[in-house]
């Protein structure tokens, strides 16, 4: 595919979106990147500081639930391509309050699809790339892998909302012929992830000698993918994937949660010159998550054989990079902890 001219990136101040922008904005100076983000608790402009003044990057504060906001941004920038990261993304939050998940993940996706379909005019629509999760497939037992043909069977309000959004995106391909692609991928980890998710939470707690809360018996399995590998996969599918197709993306790194926590304790101890046994003693088994899927594991052979993508990091190398990032970026962490990063909204928008 011809390179996109203007890419509307939704949710680019979140974990994966910010890592993607930090990689792609300098790498593709001829593309313009417009980041639309509502800056919920999970959005942090400090995560895109490094590219904030690049001439091919713009930030637009906006809510994808709000069609007028999308219209304004769409008419101003006339994107030909959409890369849709924005979502409510945390399973535990979806259990305590599902409504935002339906509104952002389903209605927000619909609004972006409608804009792309031509509702708001603009440039020729080249590609709508939707970022999704392997959680739409439900839970695996001890064996087997998720393929692109696995039946949808979501367990949590989060995964149900992502399943609904995937179906909408596919429906826009079948009904209106829009050039869409979808990636469903496994758990990501790496820099700039909000410390409510397993890996950053455990790293920060281990660094500070706080309890390490493992749900249930810690035997649940996730297939871990380093975020930069995922970002490359998204660019590959965006520019070389076939419209209407779905690609599963995984890191070939199945681990039990307990294995993950053990590795974190070992690496944090090595990096800080501490005794890893002391950190392991911080593990505390807590009440299990309701509807907790037992195992996720991805068969990534389609993207590998058709598009030549493969992950570069091993779990060990990616986890060490991640631990080092959290050790070195104390300002980012302090701002997240104190809520300081949220002041940006008050400072910039309280007068409007
Ligand atoms: P995140 O929670 O870190 O970031 C989400 C971003 O979306 C934030 O910047 C937030 O401010 C923004 N946002 C939320 N609601 C919005 C709205 N209504 N309008 C505009 N912006 C809004 O999420 P993430 O981990 O970066 O995930 C990105 C995408 O990848 C999501 O679609 C998620 O479902 C999917 N995903 C994530 C993982 C993972 O391991 N993190 C795994 C599989 C799929
Ligand atoms: P999480 O990072 O929330 O991702 P997801 O639920 O989308 O897979 O959780 C990853 C795994 O870690 C999951 O099996 C739940 C478990 N977990 C804990 O054991 N303790 C925790 O404090 C958290 C946040 C998660």
Image (tube, rainbow, N blue to C red):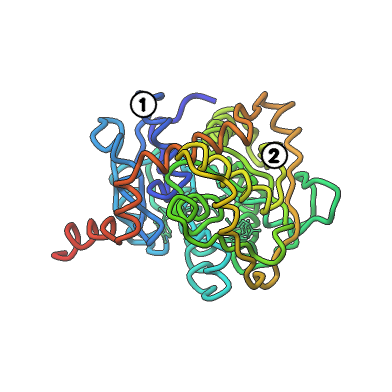
Q: Position of residue 322 (x, y in %)?
A: 49, 39
Compared to residue 325, the image places residue 115 above or below, namely: below
Does 106 sit left or right of 221 as displayed?
left
Quadrant assignment, res 223: top right
Q: Position of residue 317 (x, y in %)?
A: 58, 31
**Residue depicted at 52% across the width and 75% down the height:** 97
Q: What residue sits right under mark 2 in the picture?
A: 253
**Residue depicted at 30% across the width and 61% down the height:** 339
Compared to residue 286, the image places residue 176 above or below, namely: above
Question: Which numbered marker is on residue 62?
Answer: none
The answer to which of 311 and 243 lies nearer the viewer is 311
Q: Is tag 2's residue or tag 1's residue first in the polypeptide sequence? A: 1
Q: Give the quadrant of the C terminus.
A: bottom left
Q: What residue sits right under mark 1 in the picture?
A: 26
Does 179 sit left or right of 274 as displayed?
right
Labels 2 & 1 near each other (Cβ < 8 A): no
| Residue count near mark 2 (Cα–Cα under 10 Å), binned few <14, some 14–19, many ≥20 | some
Quadrant assignment, res 281: bottom right
The alpha-carbon separation of the residues under discs 2 and 1 comes to: 29 Å
The answer to which of 128 and 306 lies nearer the viewer is 306
| Residue count near mark 1 (Cα–Cα under 10 Å), binned few <14, some 14–19, many ≥20 | some
**Residue depicted at 23% across the width and 56% down the height:** 344
The answer to which of 64 and 192 lies nearer the viewer is 192
């Amino acid at each position: 595919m011809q390179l996109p001219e203007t890419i509307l990136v939704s949710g680019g101040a979140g974990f994966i979106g910010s890592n993607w922008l930090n990689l792609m904005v300098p790498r593709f100076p001829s593309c313009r990147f417009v980041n639309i983000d509502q800056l919920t608790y999970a959005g942090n402009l400090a995560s895109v500081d490094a590219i904030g003044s690049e001439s091919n990057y713009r930030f637009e504060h906006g809510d994808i639930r709000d069609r007028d906001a999308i219209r304004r941004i769409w008419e101003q920038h006339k994107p030909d391509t959409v890369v849709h990261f924005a979502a409510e993304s945390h399973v535990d939050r979806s259990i305590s309050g599902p409504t935002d998940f339906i509104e952002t993940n389903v209605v927000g996706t619909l609004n972006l699809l409608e804009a792309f379909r031509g509702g708001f005019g603009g440039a020729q629509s080249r590609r709508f790339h939707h970022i999704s999760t392997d959680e739409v497939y439900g839970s695996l037992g001890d064996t087997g892998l998720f393929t692109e043909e696995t039946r949808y069977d979501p367990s949590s309000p989060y995964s149900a909302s992502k399943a609904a959004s995937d179906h909408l995106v596919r429906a826009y391909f079948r009904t209106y012929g829009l050039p869409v692609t979808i990636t469903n991928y496994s758990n990501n980890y790496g820099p700039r992830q909000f410390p409510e998710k397993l890996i950053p939470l455990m790293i920060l707690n281990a660094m500070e000698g706080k309890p390490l809360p493992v749900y249930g018996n810690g035997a649940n399995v996730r297939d871990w993918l380093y975020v930069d590998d995922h970002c490359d996969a998204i660019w590959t599918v965006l520019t070389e994937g076939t419209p209407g197709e779905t690609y599963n993306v995984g890191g070939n790194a199945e681990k039990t949660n307990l294995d993950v926590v053990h590795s974190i304790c070992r690496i944090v101890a090595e990096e800080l010159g501490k005794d890893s046994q002391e950190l392991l003693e911080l593990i505390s088994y807590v009440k299990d998550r309701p509807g907790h899927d037992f195992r996720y594991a991805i068969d990534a052979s389609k993207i590998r054989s058709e598009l030549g993508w493969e992950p570069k990091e091993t779990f060990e190398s990616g986890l060490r990079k991640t631990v080092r990032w959290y050790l070195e970026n104390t300002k980012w962490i302090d701002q997240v902890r104190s809520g300081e990063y949220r002041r940006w909204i008050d400072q910039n928008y309280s007068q409007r």
